[in-house]
Amino acid sequence: MPRRKQSTHAWVYLIWGLNGFAILSILAFSALYRTSFRASAADGGTPTARPGETRQIPPTSYFLPTLTPNPFYTPPVFETPTPFVLPRGLRPAVIGFSLAGRPIEVYTFGDGEKEYLIVAGIHGGYEGNTIALANELITYLDENPEVISGDVTLYIIRNMNPDAEARSNDVDGRVNNNGVDLNRNFPSSNWTADWDRDGCWIYRPTTGGAYAGSEPETRSVMSFIGSHKIIAMISYHSAALGVFPGGVPWEEPSKRLAKALSKATGYSYPPVDTGCEYTGTLADWAVENRVGAAVDMELSTHKYTDFKENLKALKVLLSFEP
Ligand SMILES: [Zn+2]
């Protein structure tokens, strides 16, 4: 019995020994094979640089990336919603961009030291006739430069809210792309994000902005006004309520400008009181920030430009002394 047990053990050792030898042989063979493969590849390869040689690197352009167009890049399209081009080639300057990247343009007439400003389109396509009026005034002044006397500079921002104009010519085209009423976004002393809607425009939801001066359109106009010494300005609206002087409460020079404009145009002064409280307006902010006099002036309808009346208004504006 013990002998049989011993011989069984011997067989087990022999089989495991043979297995181990076979495995080791395979490993050794594959290791040798791969070593010889690498060695032969290295033998046939290109000679390595000798010590002392330096690689010839071309000058600086060597490390510049190649200019491969990115197939996912869409270039921004800077277009004005209503193409407006003057035949004699006068070009506007761009004072900033809307949320959608549309330019906010200013036309400049004359180069005198007395600076005046007209702003149109603050309420977009909903008051699109103010933009049409600005286009007519710009075309008229381009053809009749003698209207601007030597000591005067007139700036016309023809469309302060181009995204809203591009969106719609109806109630949907009033606020900017953040849903903000730009004429309630200026950081005047009475700015509020929300207000009592009694007597106010209520056809769509809107706010005064996340904070005063939050919108790029607002900041573009603020920085333009801040970099000039504007004597008097008109911010055009429609429709029908009349001429609103700037200031909280209304300031004397702005009341005087409103009265003179009312007399020239027939627009109401004092303006129609609907009970609405206006906050954060461009005109209010302007007179709190070095502008001599400012008004919000409403055309009589949403449709017509009242060009004849507003040519008279232009003459009143350009001769105004605060
Ligand atoms: Zn308006």
Image (tube, rainbow, N blue to C red):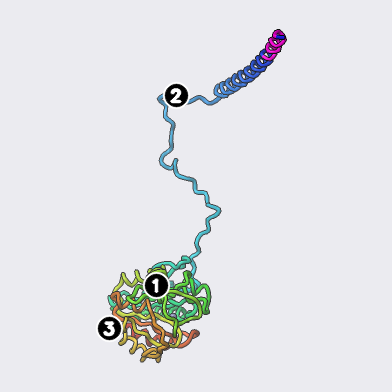
Mark 1 Cβ inside 8 Å of ligand 1: no
Quick check: 286 above or below 63? Answer: below
Q: Mark 1 points at which residue?
A: 106
Q: What kind of residue is marked 3?
A: Glu
**Residue at figure coordinates x 39%, y 86% from the top left:** 311
Circle nearer the N terminus (3, 1): 1
Secondary-structure class at tag 3: loop
Question: What's the distance in space between the residues labelled 3 and 2, CA to CA?
Answer: 86 Å
Whether the magenta-drawn stretch holds residue 269 is answered as: no
Most prominent secondary structure in the magenta stretch?
Answer: helix
In what quadrant of the picture does the C terminus appear? Answer: bottom left
**Percent coordinates x, y for residue 255 in the rendering:** 31, 86
Q: Which quadrant of the structure image shows residue 1? A: top right
Q: How many marks?
A: 3
Q: In which quarter of the image is residue 188?
A: bottom left
**Label 2 crowding class (10 Å Cα cut-off): few <14, some 14-19, many 20+?**
few
Q: Give the camera-side residue of 235 and 112.
A: 235
Q: Position of residue 165 (x, y in %)?
A: 49, 74
Q: Quadrant of ligand 1?
A: bottom left
Q: On the rendered structure, is 267 left or right of 248? A: right
**What percent of the width, then of the height, locates residue 233?**
34, 79
Residue with the mark numbered 2: 50
Marks 2 and 1 sit apart, C-alpha to C-alpha, by: 67 Å
Amino acid beneath label 1: Val
Q: Is residue 191 left or right of residue 35?
A: left
Q: Is residue 91 visible?
A: no
- Read off the residue under disc 3: 321
Residue stretch rendered in magenta on the structure: 2-12
Type of the residue with mark 2: Arg
Q: Distance between the residues labelled 3 and 1?
A: 23 Å
Between 135 and 125, the residue placed more toward the observer is 125
Q: Work out whether residue 266 or residue 32 is closer to the camera in this orientation and state it.
A: 32
